[in-house]
Amino acid sequence: MKSYDVIIVGGGAAGFFAAINIAELNPNLSIAILERGKTGLQKVKISGGGRCNVTHAEFVPSELVGNYPRGEKELLGPFHQFMTGDTIEWFDKRGVTLKIEDDGRMFPVTNSSQTIIDCFLNEVKKHKVDVLYNHALKSLKQSNEQWLLETTQGDFSANKIMVATGSNPKIWKVLEQLGHTIAQPVPSLFTFDIKDERIKGIPGVVALDVEVKVKGSNLWSEGPLLITHVGMSAPAILKLSAFGAIELAKRDYKFQIEVNFIKQSLDDCLDHLKTLKQDLARKTVLKLAQFELPKRLWQKLVLASNITHDTRWADLNKFQTEQLALQLTKAVFTVDGKSTFKEEFVTAGGIHLKEVNFKSFESKLYENLYFAGEILNVDAVTGGFNFQNAWTGAYIAAKAISK
Ligand SMILES: Cc1cc2nc3c(=O)[nH]c(=O)nc-3n(C[C@H](O)[C@H](O)[C@H](O)COP(=O)(O)OP(=O)(O)OC[C@H]3O[C@@H](n4cnc5c(N)ncnc54)[C@H](O)[C@@H]3O)c2cc1C
């Protein structure tokens, strides 16, 4: 049996980040990463469309936590210890410069996730961390203050272990057998499948700032909305999919949404339309998009309001005006299923947060057992927040483990 001071199970974002920090904080410890794959960091590789959205330019802990449907309360303390600014500095010190995009997402200036992977691989080599690929953890037990790990390539022992296996149901089972509780996994960060004449044939059209509500619930969000070949996407939808992950799963992803494309009340919109009737009386309604909406979307909404191609503003009757106001402010769409958002997806669910000490990311059930990353019942909206959770948990656990 091979022994180490510290074994990290899972060579993903959290696992590598933890191993490097432990090695740096305490160079005397022998450390190994056990990774089931023939390479590690596979999600880092494909993340952010291959660019790796490392974190998000939000520097206030109380604001940052608002992006975590699960973990909001628990991450506040940890973010006071290690958050965005620390992430930027950490990478900068190791030669990786991050840049901020207009929407706040942060990427390596190289626009390549390989930069992050190369950084991690250099660091583990420098600090002599053993990275053992093709080693899948099968079982785990504690005996005489030692952790015993059975893997597909033999047994290991360690004083302290960190389990950072992401959303792996098999490892959740192993931890359940140890007495931990697992919040049932459901997908988060997905797009909505919608078949509707109003969005048919206009993929790529973006309404810059809309409000979306899920009918029959308190779920709502706002932000950009993208029309796709199969439905709707972009932050306004992805935020709903994250905050509504559990509720929408219960509804089997069949529900209705109400979209306010112009973020005005129905009455304000009607007033605005009355003014337009006077100002643009001789112009056709269809031709000139209003409310800063993209032309193709405007035309779809106009046609859905019983207004014909050649109707002029002056000729709009009361019914048509009301229909148009409704389409602009309370357009109801039927969602029938979900699709994967290619740039980022996560699983809601994982180790119950009440069983983890968030000062150290140590299990409250067992000493010297630590967790970080997606294995916990923490997940975030899209934008770099999921990795920030991995970096924060891994760093704080590393501090505790290295003592
Ligand atoms: C397509 C995609 C794009 C994404 N893009 C972004 C993004 O741009 N920004 C962002 O913030 N988040 C992004 N995410 C989410 C982000 O990748 C995860 O939140 C993050 O990787 C979680 O890190 P982790 O270390 O907890 O888990 P992982 O990165 O999943 O790593 C877990 C590791 O454990 C290994 N493992 C599992 N079981 C065992 C076992 N039994 N024995 C040994 N090893 C095991 C796995 O092989 C894996 O290498 C994306 C996710 C996806 C799927």
Image: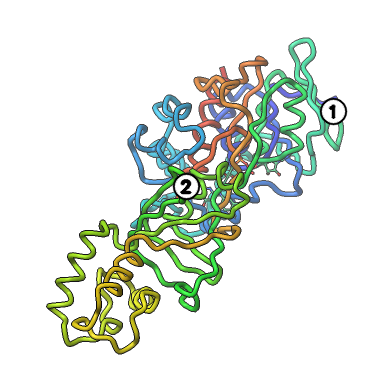
Q: Nearer the viewer, mark 1 or mark 2?
A: 2
Residue plotted at (21% across, 81% down) = 313
- Identify the mark at residue 317; answer none if there is no mark: none
Q: Which residue is mark 1?
A: 155
From what the image shows, is residue 10 above or below residue 210?
above
Judge whether residue 121 can be spotted in this image.
no
Quadrant housing the N terminus: top right
Provide residue 336's location: percent of width, then percent of height.
59, 60
Q: Nearer the viewer, residue 365 or 305?
A: 305
Q: Which residue is nearer to you in this view: 184 or 24?
A: 184
Q: Is residue 168 above or below residue 149?
A: below
Q: Is residue 383 left or right of residue 393?
A: left
The quadrant holding residue 32 is top right
Q: Quadrant of the C terminus?
A: top right
Sequence-earlier tag: 1 or 2? 1
Query: Which residue in the structure is indicated by mark 2?
Result: 216
Determine the residue positioned at 51% across, 26% down. 396
Residue 146: percent from the left, percent from the top?
75, 16
Q: Quadrant of residue 375?
A: top right
Indicate yes or no: mark 1 CB to ligand 1 under 8 Å: no
- Can residue 150 be seen by looking at this rendering? yes
- Give the alpha-carbon distance from disc 1 to disc 2, as whole Å: 52 Å
Q: Residue at x 83, y 29 (%)?
A: 150
Three-letter amino acid code at disc 2?
A: Gly
